[in-house]
Image: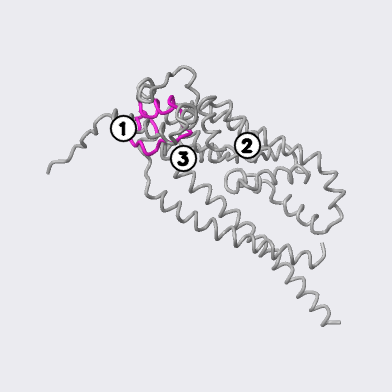
Amino acid sequence: MSDYLLTQIINQGAPLFGLILFMGALGVPVPASILLIAAGAFSQQGILTWYSAAILGLLGAVLGDAVSFGIGYYARDWVQARFGKSATWKSARDTFDSRAGMAVYLTRFLITALAVPTNLIAGGSGIRFRRFMTYDTLGEMTWVILYGGLGYWFGSNWEVVSDFISNFGGLLLGIVLLGAGIWLGTRQLKKRAATLDLDLEE
Amino acid sequence: MTPSQQRILTIGLVTLGVLIVGFFGLRTFHAFREFRGHRPPGPPFGDKHAETDVELIRDWMTIGSLSRMYDMPHRLLYDALGIPPNGNEKKSLKQLNDEYFPDQPGFVLETVKAAIQANLPPPTATPTSSP
């Protein structure tokens, strides 16, 4: 699919690029980061105009994020009815609320695989849309400048950069999952130890 | 969530995390070695320079994009393939191959590479500093 999309971006230019990033932000499985690096390289080669690619790409990504935030917002009643009474859900929601800005910002460019779930959770958790959009726009700008800039800088050698970044993103995702597992496990052990202490005291 | 469900979730997250870290860790290491071996091809800003390495040509590229990338008239590449430019501007090398040379896989890619290589400007000698 990447090859087909790359050919179409060469032919249709920045508007299609923006549309693809919009779809990616909605959760359609498109290799958005790879295409962004490629768009940077195409700009260096004179195939795309860098500012139109940057503006339309940013616009597409931010609009897509806003829509997926909206989906989370309108699905929150269902989520609340389904998980609202669970203590774990409440705890997870509180943890997210306290770190929402950083989570939104970092998932835009560092752990991009978690961007769409973060949008949905943010929409459902009740954080304000303006706050979400501030961190989201900052994060997407970082993404466009960093990844697009690398593509522009490396030009025709962009595939080497893209390969490294894709794998590094996967590695970070693994570290996040592992960290979450260790954090949960530690919490369970502490809880169990506290219960044992109480039992001994009685 | 019951304690046993929490335990399953924890074990699942740790197992998945270890697998993903192992898989992508190795790939990242290899990609980093490749990455370090490459330097940006030229000045990132300022004058655009034409590419000279034909090994960077891929079959998703179009004749038009290659013409820009290697600063070469697109007519020259169509002539090398023996096909007309009209109606083929937006087709990738793979699409051109499938349409015009279906029984010769990779023919268009190799022909275009050879045509560009043959028409690249001669390498300019880098000035050496005299003692």
- Alpha carbon separation for disc pair 3 and 2: 19 Å
Q: What element carries label 1?
A: helix
Query: Residue under circle 3?
Result: A150
In front: mark 3 or mark 2?
3
Subunit under mark 3: A
Query: Residue under circle 1?
Result: B117
Q: Is mark 2 on a helix, strand or loop?
A: helix
Whole-percent x and y of residue A92? 75, 55
Q: Quadrant of residue A20?
A: top right
Whether label 1 touches label 2, CB < 8 Å: no
Q: Is mark 3 on a helix, strand or loop?
A: helix
The image shows residue A168, relative to residue A25, as above or below, that is below
Q: In which quarter of the image is residue A172?
A: bottom right
Subunit under mark 2: A
The residue lying toward the viewer, choosing from A157 and A137, is A157
**Dominant secondary structure, magenta:** loop
Of the residues shown, which amino acid type is indicated by label 1? Gln
Residue A137 is tagged as 2
Q: Give the range drawn in magenta.
A: B45-71
Q: Which of marks 3 and 2 is nearer the N terminus?
A: 2
Residue A29 is tagged as none
Say whether mark 1 and mark 3 are on the same chain.
no
Subunit under mark 1: B
Of the residues shown, which amino acid type is indicated by label 3? Leu
